[in-house]
Image (cartoon, rainbow, N blue to C red):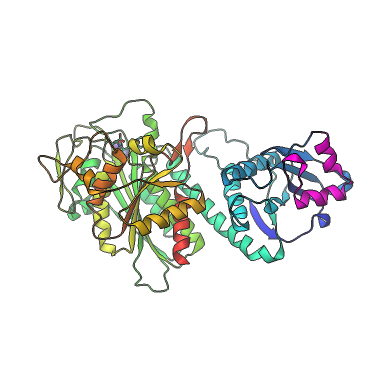
Amino acid sequence: MKYTVKNTALSALTGNVIVGVFEEGKLSPAAQALDQLSQGAISQLINAGDVKGKQGEVVTLRLPSANLERIFVVGCGKQGELNVRQYKQLIKSVIQAVKATSAAQVHNFLTEVQINERDLYWNVRFAVESIAESFYQFDQFKSKKSDQNTALQEMVFVVDSAQQTEAEKAVQQGQAIALGVRCAKDVANCPPNVCNPAYLAEQAKELAEKSPHFKVNVLGEKEMAELGMNAYLAVSQGSQNEAQLSIIEYRNHPNPQAKPIVLVGKGLTFDAGGISLKPADSMDEMKYDMGGAASVYGVMNALAELQLPLNVIGVLAGCENLPDGNAYRPGDILTTMSGLTVEVLNTDAEGRLVLCDTLTYVERFEPELVIDIATLTGACVVALGQHNSGLMSPNDRLAEQLLNAAQQSADKAWRLPLSEEYQEQLKSPFADLANIGGRWGGAITAGEFLSNFTKNYTWAHLDIAGTAWLQGANKGATGRPVNLLTQFLIDQVK
Ligand code: BES
Ligand code: MN
Ligand code: ZN
């Protein structure tokens, strides 16, 4: 799909156009122009009740009198009341209608439609993101691919000439983010017999060919053993698939010595729970337990497109958690890379064990800040549901910046508290820490567990257990929080 930005009058066009109408017969400027060109044809349709302006309504018209091929009239609801979610839905509806025709190029006048508290940049960027989403398919493993033979090749955003630059930036950034989201979805949707830790590492290595700013290094179990990453290794020891820790360095800061932003992704390519085995129901969804690593991989792809002048290190902590004769046990005491010892009380609380050693490992990069992203706890889904990622950080400034990026990018996050009282729940009679904190506040105690390993830098934790994938009819990876994180990085440049 090609996106272009142009300043054209509707009267000068001959092809396909998308125009908005509102409820109560209110027309957008383009719809008004069209109405005039066609001797009131739009008003007549409204008066006849064929066009109501209801949100998401799309009426496809041919108006010979207007010299145009097709007109997609899109209902935008009550004027002045369109929110981001509704706008994205509306874009998806119109794309569906366009796909049903043989239109190859469309001129989009929805750029005139005001989204609540958003400017033109967001109108265009959300459109690009939504279009990419409606084209996404994961049918690599189907013998019969779904029919994607759509004629649509080009979307032209029609804007005032004064807005040209802003709209072009929105197209460029929207496309980079859409690419990052697609990359994240593709690896996350990939089945666990294919997407194992070695596969994740392979994807990371291939990134190095995408841009000269990348340097990729992969640690296997031997290297991890030498470093004393015993908690990480304990989780992996029940699996035939070797754990792989991929480090993707992106260096493009004008000052090469600038401290890097480090993103650490939990990469459990499958989490059966280990000896504390999970119930069978929905266990297949634990292929998504590498959603954090997938999002870091996605962000690194977006970064290669955006070429942001930053130093960013993406870390994919690949591992598999399975029951086995050689698996780690409840009761085992592990000595982490940091020196802290951990009593394992539940082998299904494995994410924090993989992450704690990885978080110690990244100290060597002397990070500006570290953000870990993990499908860490079912408790986070209980607390926040499936629409907000859980954000935890002892640093108010970093938390604010991330919440702001989440709000801007419409990739929602909500902050949960951290404080020392919760550490009581992690006490063990035999080791420095237990790996679970009991029934209450499970998302927070998991965050608290990690906080013991992040004292030497500024840190935030994103629990994406509820947001990384969708269940039910639309089952599949969401690519979240690629959008939030990429926005955060874009904001770091300003
Ligand atoms: N990967 C899971 C968390 C998870 C569960 C994500 C359901 C998405 C949906 C994690 O490794 C896990 O099993 N956590 C346990 C922790 C518990 C044993 C303290 C959980 O949430 O049940
Ligand atoms: Mn688990
Ligand atoms: Zn897990």
Count of marks, rendered view: 0
Asked whether residue 32 is drawn in magenta, I would say yes
User: Residue at left 79%, top 33%?
Assistant: 49
Taking depth in this image into account, of 249 and 217 the one nearest to the observer is 249
Taking depth in this image into account, of 278 and 194 the one nearest to the observer is 278
Rendered location of residue 235, percent (x, y): 24, 41
Q: Is residue 482 left or right of residue 135?
A: left
User: Residue at left 47%, top 65%?
Assistant: 308
Q: What stretch is highlighted in magenta?
A: 21-49
Asked whether residue 199 is drawn in magenta, I would say no
| Quarter of the rendered structure image containing ligand 3 | top left
In the depicted structure, whether residue 381 falls above or below residue 117:
above
In the depicted structure, whether residue 251 falls above or below residue 245:
below
Tell me, yes or no, if residue 193 can be seen here: no
Q: In this view, does 354 lie to the left or right of 263?
A: left
Query: Which residue, as the protein is rendered here, is positioned at the far left?
Result: 430
Taking depth in this image into account, of 207 and 231 the one nearest to the observer is 231
Give the overall secondary structure of the magenta segment.
helix
Query: Which residue, as the protein is rendered here, is positioned at the far top?
Result: 280
Tell me, yes or no, if residue 444 can be seen here: yes
Rendered location of residue 345, percent (x, y): 19, 35
Rendered location of residue 459, percent (x, y): 31, 56
Rendered location of residue 480, percent (x, y): 45, 46
User: Residue at left 55%, top 58%?
Assistant: 173
User: Residue at left 18%, top 54%?
Assistant: 338
In the depicted structure, whether residue 385 falls above or below residue 65:
above
